[in-house]
Amino acid sequence: MALSPYRSSLQGGTFRPSAMRLERPLSMGSSTKQSAAAAATVVTPPPRSKSSSSLSQTRRSASATRPSRDESGVAGRVRVAVRLRPRNADELIADADFGDYVELMPELKRLKLRKNNWDSETFQFDEVLTETASQKRVYEVVAKPVVESVLEGYNGTVMAYGQTGTGKTFTLGRLGEEDTADRGIMVRAMEDILADISSEQDAVTVSYLQLYMETVQDLLAPEKDNIPIVEDPKTGDVSLPGVTLYEVRDQRSFVELLQIGEANRFAANTKLNTESSRSHAILLVNVRKTVRPKQERELAALNENVTNLQLSKGHRIPTIRRSKLIIVDLAGSERVDKSGSEGHTLEEAKFINLSLTALGKCINALAENSPHVPIRDSKLTRLLRDSFGGTARTSLIVTIGPSPQHRGETTSTILFGQRAMRVENMMKLREEFDYKSLCRKLETDLDRLVAENERQNQAVLDAEEEMEQKIQEAQQSVTEAEKKLATTLEEMAAERFRFQKEHAETLHKLEQERALREKLEKELKDNAQNLHAQKENASLSKENKTLQHDLEESLKQKKALEHEVKNVKQQLFKLNFEADETRKSRDKEPTRTLIGSDSPLLNSHKPMNMRDSLNGQRASIAKLFEEVGLQKILSLLDSEDMGVRVHAVKVVANLAAEEANQEKIVEAGGMDSLLSLLQTSEDETIQRVAAGAIANLAMNETNQELIMAQGGIRLLARTANQAEDPQTLRMVAGAIANLCGNDKLQGRLREEGGIKALLGMVRSRHPDVLAQIARGLANFAKCESRGVTEGCRKERSLLIDDGALPWIISNANSESSPVRRHIELALCHLAQHEVNAKDLVAAGALWELLRISEECSREDIRNLAKRTLTASPTFQSELRKVHLGHG
Ligand code: ADP
Ligand code: MG
């Protein structure tokens, strides 16, 4: 047999779910189906009692459209259909003379009971099923909406009420084994349930009971003949501890269960001498469904709490629905005591009918909204407390027979149905979080993690062990390597020692060999020399004598020459000493300069004593000139001896101061020597003295050209740029100043940087240097103005081109009178040429010229300035501007 006895291990066979129960409204997703089903069964309600009409009206209007949502559930009235059994063979005969007592108006869902020929009563039902109604249609109209509700998580009840023989069992319990069209509500309901649930996740269990004389017997385990009914005081949920719960996996096993139940019912009734029509058969179907994600999403949309209550993603709390379908085949509704044929005492009869009577009372109370509903009066009402006035969707089918002979029973059945229609239920969703299965899942996860953890720990331990081993191995190999290294080092040391020893020995041997070789070579050489000497001795001795004689002669000459040089040197030193002494005494006279005025060294204003000394000096030099010769003195300029060179240049400079000597010096190549000395010597004294000599030579026009031709300007300019000593600069400036006075050389002088060099030396603020610069500029300007007068010069002054003006102007009123005088002259010369006038005005020369024309101590210059100012149109116009016009 394909039955699987199932007992809930936690609940001890009760129907009461232990977990938290979520009682929530019907899902919107099923509302279409729900309302469609509801619409099919909606009718104009039967007359209501006054006390409850308003409340019922409200409730009905809600249920007539679509299930209304509120906190507790969906309002749902008990649906009632009436089914008329076709006449059986007996009735066809017995009632042949009578008219129809029951008249059906199925399209109006009305039923008319004919009291007599002129009086009848009409009743409105949710559905009126004629004698021809098929079992399929009856199921779809009466039970299918309830089954669907159950599958959606609501409790449901389908119950048949009616007189014995009117077709309750036919309607509910037919198995349809011979004719499949005969299948009753139980079989069809299970078919729909099994088709809907998932065999893996969901479960359907079944209990089958009989209630007789207030005793509950398990029809699937008939030995359990007194099963208690227990109600949860909090939830009101009913459970039957100890009842057999069979898990149904397929339709066949369910049909077999029903057969077993029927067989047991028959056996029990035979044993107890009871009739099945006096007992209630109750089929309990428990459906446990896991909510699918799609349904959950719909739910979440309805109620945010659901999502809030979810745990993390990985551990979503599964939601399950536990609903219960109760199908009740009630005992016959006819009164037991009616005929007395069954041989019961009245008390017995009352007890037999207690449950049914109590059900009638409860329904009356509920229909009239009575405050007290006597649910606890019977076991049936206790079992069905959820079906009437509770949270289940309930469908009642009242079965009637057509025979007017049972007029009374039929009428009371109809009235029972009418009252039941007034009972309002509040359907609640039986949904709960499946903490148990979540717990199982978490436990499984935990176990898996623990196992994994253990494995990982072990792996870590293994790895550590392996590492340890490797470290040991490594240490061992290090030790070995160290040992090897030590050995190798020892070996190498020994080897080195051996090599060193060998090396020393080899060196020693080589040394010995070398000494030996040297000794041999010496011996060889000695021998060869001996041999050679012996050979040549004879022929050389003669020649040797001649040579020796020559050599002695040469040595004598050399000595004589050296003596002569020594004398010259002494004379040179003596002369220079005197010259230095003379200079020292002269330098004490500050207003005098060696190189001043137009004839630098020939100053006729020198004091007597100095002139004497100079004359003495010149006499000595002239004497030297005669004694030594100019050529020799000049050759000493190249001497390697620095001291000699210094003295020689001083002598040459002093000679050059004498006009008579200048030509001789130049002829003897003295200019070349002086210029090359200026170029090559780093010595400041030599430079100063050489520059002085050149300055003296530069007084002569021929020499000026010579200096220029030999690149003297560049050399002087170079010295001018490099020298720091004011005396050197004074000499250089004097030399250039002399050159500036040569008309022919003006252009070249300027091209080779003469003017620039001159102006560059203003950095030395020494008045002697500045005086020479001013003299040079005055010379240059004088030559230019001469050129202008002669008509061979038209351009602007080269001095202005080379930027001399600012310095000229700023020193025009110099405190040093030589500077001032030269500049005044220079300015007057520049002003002679009208081309320069604008630049002069711009530089501020006009005011200087005015000053000169008024204040200059020299009359000729004063007049020159006046003339110039008068002659120049530019100056005149400038002066007119300031109302100072001359002439
Ligand atoms: P109850 O269970 O109400 O006592 P049953 O279901 O046993 O009544 O029906 C009594 C008899 O009437 C049975 O023989 C049954 O086959 C027959 N019967 C009942 N309803 C119908 C029906 N709608 N069509 C045909 N026969 C029916
Ligand atoms: Mg029956």
Image: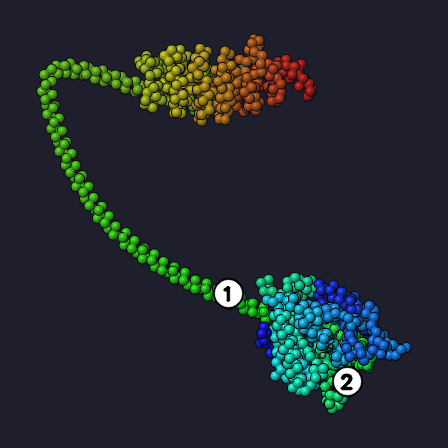
Residue 773 in the image: state x and y as whole percent: 50, 21
Circle 1 is placed at which residue position? Answer: 449
Viewer-side residue, 144 vs 662: 144
Q: Mark 2 or 1, which is nearer the eye? A: 2
Residue 228 in the image: state x and y as whole percent: 65, 83
Residue sitting at 65 percent across and 86 percent down? 271
Q: Quadrant of ligand 1?
A: bottom right
Circle 2 is placed at which residue position? Answer: 335
**For the image shown, how many numbered marks are present on the structure?**
2
Residue sitting at 71 percent across and 74 percent down? 172
- Under mark 1, the amino acid is Leu
Q: In which quarter of the image is the C terminus?
A: top right
Q: Mark 1 and mark 2 in contact (Cβ < 8 Å)?
A: no
Label 1 sits on a secondary structure element that is helix
Label 2 sits on a secondary structure element that is loop
Asked whether mark 2 lies closer than 8 Å to ligand 1, one says no
- N-terminal-most mark, 2 or 1: 2
Can you see residue 462?
A: yes
Residue sitting at 46 percent across and 24 percent down? 721
Q: In which quarter of the image is the N terminus?
A: bottom right
- Taking the image as shown, residue 706 lies to the left or right of residue 114, namely left
- Taking the image as shown, residue 347 lies to the left or right of residue 448, namely right
